[in-house]
Amino acid sequence: METKKLFEKYYARLRRIGLLKSLILSGIIGLTVMFGVALALWFFDPAVWEVIVYSLGGGLVVTGLFMPLFYFTRFRPSTQKIAKMIDQLGLEERIITMYELEQDESYIAMKQREDAKAKMSEVNEKQIKVRLSRVALVFLLIVGVFGLGMTTVSVLGAHGIIDKEALMPELPPIFDNTEWCEVNYVAYGFGMIEGEEAQLVEKGQDATPVVAIADDGYIFMGWDDGVETPDRWDRHVEDHLYVNAVFVPVQESEDGESMQQPQDNQDPPEQDQPQNEPDDSDQDDQQSEQDPSMSPPQKNQDPSDGSGGSQMYDNNTIIDGETDYTTEFDYDTNMEDLAGDDSLPPDLKDSIGGYYDTLKP
């Protein structure tokens, strides 16, 4: 208790030093908050008083909240801290020893306290220097410039003195619901597209015009979607578009005139048949009228009368024109004889049996 009274004059100085350090650290946080709030208000349309209240007021409130927190948790002076700081003034740990032996009533402890008190009388509390962190001071300066500067700019912008629209960059919309259509004009060899071949067009808008130009020796035939002119300008595009320009080679006729070669999927033009030249069907009709033997056999015609010529009949029942093998051939008897003939190999039996099947009535 006696030691604490000796340190009383040092408490006030160390308390001021602790409050100053707490103010610096809490001020860094408060000015940072001030800058953030002022920057956020810049992108809106607040009133002047709103900028002052939210930016300056917010920074001061944060500073006021953090200052006691830093003081009581880190910079609040204590007897032990004061004793250590006094010893740093050249007392060679006399004060901290006196503090530790405060309850000791021995002769040595009493002599040590007397010596420490005599040395303390030679020390002035103003000799205790205020030591501040240079890093903290630099941070305080930086955030102070940014925080107060941004708050000033926001106030001037809210007052209309600064044109915010001229200073703010045009930001793209966060959600873009625009529908786009891909438009492609393609020329596979033999020509080229003059203009923008690949385009990205907003739905419902117009594409840029293009022209299809054929190479030497080729001619433009049209676009594969039906457009016949080489130049086209697609208006009010509503869907993706992918079209090809069609080119064909140019041929010259015997008289030197250029002729267009038909496309692969185009049928060649039909040539007129001479009027005086009979077609094949007419010749067949005339031959059948002149030569009865060339006429097709009638349904009930007798093949034995020789008028059949070389006609083919079912199952080859007529071979020599006279014998009807359907009546002469006994299928069952011949098949039994064939099966009982052991002199024939199986392959030959199968062949003969197949022939007998054709003569089966």
Image: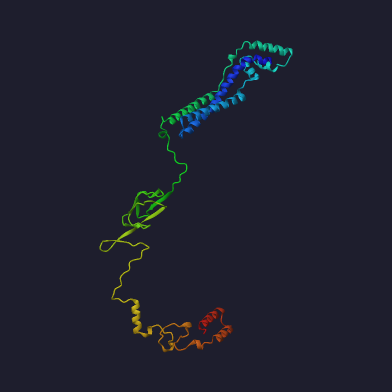
**Residue at x 36%, y 82% (from the top left corner):** 288
The image shows residue 98, relative to residue 317, as above or below, that is above
Percent position (x, y) of residue 11? 62, 17
**Among all residues in the image, which is located at the extreme left?**
255
Position of the N terminus by quadrant: top right
Q: Position of residue 204 (x, y in %)?
A: 40, 50
Camera-side residue of 353 and 19: 19
Q: What residue is drawn where x is 58% and y is 19%?
A: 16
Is 129 on the left or on the right of 154, as rendered?
A: right
Q: Position of residue 354 (x, y in %)?
A: 53, 80
Which of 123 and 315 lies nearest the eye of the viewer?
123
How many numbered marks are there? Answer: 0
- Residue situated in front as seen by the camera: 322 or 156: 156
Type of colouring: rainbow
Q: Is residue 87 above or below residue 192?
A: above
**Residue nearer the viewer, 143 or 165:** 165
* 338 w.r.t. 255: above or below: below
Residue 343 percent across, percent down from the top left: 57, 83
The structure residue drawn at horizontal position 33% and vertical position 79%, both measured from the top left corner, is 283
Q: Is residue 48 left or right of residue 278?
A: right
